Image: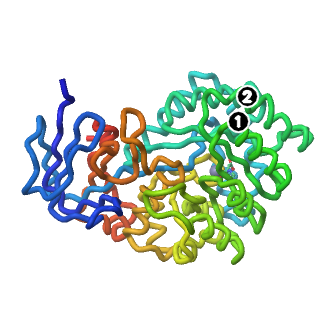
Amino acid sequence: MSPATILVTNIGELSTQDHSADAPVLQDAAIVFEGERISWIGPARNAPAADEVIDAGGRAGLPGWVDSHTHLVFAGDRSAEFEARMAGKAYEAGGIAVTTEATRAASDYDLTRLLLARAAEAAAGGTTYLETKTGYGLNVEEERRHARIASTVADAVTFLGAHLVPDGADADEYTDLVCTDMLAAVRPYVQWADVFCEKGAFTEGQSRRVLQAAADAGLGLRVHGNQLGPGAGVQLAAEFGAASVDHVNHLSDDDVAALADTWSGWDAGAGVPGTVATCLPACDLSTRAPLAPARRLLDAGVQVALASNCNPGTSFTSSMAFCVATAVLQMGLTVQEAVRAATYGGALALRVHTGEDRDGVRAVGSLAVGHRADLQLLNAPSAAHLAYRPGMPLTGMVFKAGVPVRR
Ligand SMILES: N=CN[C@@H](CCC(=O)O)C(=O)O
Ligand SMILES: [Zn+2]
């Protein structure tokens, strides 16, 4: 028996983000889901019959957000650190240790409950594909525990044992541990590995060792780079073929050129993608950092993603709509560029932009036949309202794999 079909019709503006289509933005459109997959997209007047019909009432539709960078496995509160920062204190990587202590003390039950609540908040805001990281465990047993818990909730899990050298540890010995026992312990639960390559965290040499060990273990690579100042993160990410380098606040012309180079042979949808530059505007605002140069990156030919970086230290929000609004209002992106970065860009950064479109391997981040049925409707007639009416509760119905996760 074939799965039930759902027709969502009377969509005033449908931003498919399918750039292989004639028009990536359709007017007066409809979309049909068959189980977890999209089975039809086109003008509402031509829509086929379906088991269930949902009238969007002229609202805008777009792919669910792909949030490619979060740190949601944590306990504790760092609002005092935030307040101190707003009073002029600079952000330092060392704050991670405060969360590590609180997270180690939390039970599996509490950590899972906290993670579920945060994932539910993200879904309520339109996020339908969620990455999250370890990185507040910082010893073998805790990193394994956080990876296991994360894997029960998130769509993609990243190992970030190389987030901070724990108090009292020798940096090189700790890096060895990350590359050996810790990596082996988390391996069953994660698809990605990441390193915080920054002053106060991991040096270029240590980062290189982490990336090599992770690649040897068959993990995809990501890098936290060039957040607090110029550094080696971007160049390392490009050299190792990382799927993404995140933060990218402080970039030289060589850094931008190195990222652009990784995209020179890529033709949308065909070939191996380069290294996405993932911009984290909510984090930049919360740390009073210069906003990442998303416009400059796009103009240079680099594929850009927007992500929330939801974490207790630098960005305690999972609102992708806020990130999109900021990218438009303050970073010089057009509405469609920002929406693309928060959907297709995130999917590229997690290498789920394309798939075989078979069970369990469905593309996300754009709306096309065969892709996963991840759709959000806005309580607004067009995506422009995300920036035109910033901060307003515009998220309407949200579907993840064809299932409504918000009514
Ligand atoms: N930059 C490194 N890690 C996080 C912050 C973690 C924390 O301060 O707790 C980030 O992406 O901003
Ligand atoms: Zn991060």
Is label 1 in a helix, a strand or a loop?
loop
Left or right of 47 in this view: 197 = right
Q: Nearer the viewer, mark 2 or mark 1?
A: 1
Q: Which numbered disc flags the more N-terminal residue, 2 or 1?
A: 2
Residue 238 position in % (x across, y down):
68, 60
Name the residue type under label 2: Ala
As drawn, 211 above or below 5: below
Is residue 74 or residue 26 the one in the foreground?
A: 26
The quarter of the picture where residue 161 lies is: top right
Binning the other alpha carbons within 10 Å of mark 1 as few (below 14), some (14 to 19) or many (20 upward) gives some
Look at the numbered discs 2 and 1 and tell me whether their residues touch, using CB distance below 8 Å: yes
Q: Which residue is mark 1?
A: 217
As drawn, 233 above or below 35: below
Is label 2 in a helix, a strand or a loop?
helix
Which quadrant holds the N terminus?
A: top left
Cα distance between the residues tagged 2 and 1 = 8 Å
The residue that appears at 13% across and 49% down in the rendered structure is 55
Left or right of 28 in this view: 239 = right
Name the residue type under label 1: Ala
Left or right of 70 in this view: 269 = left
The residue that appears at 17% across and 36% down in the rendered structure is 5
Left or right of 336 in this view: 4 = left
Residue 200 position in % (x across, y down):
82, 54
Q: Which residue is mark 2?
A: 184
The residue that appears at 67% across and 42% down in the rendered structure is 193
Which quadrant holds the C terminus?
A: top left
The quarter of the picture where residue 184 lies is: top right
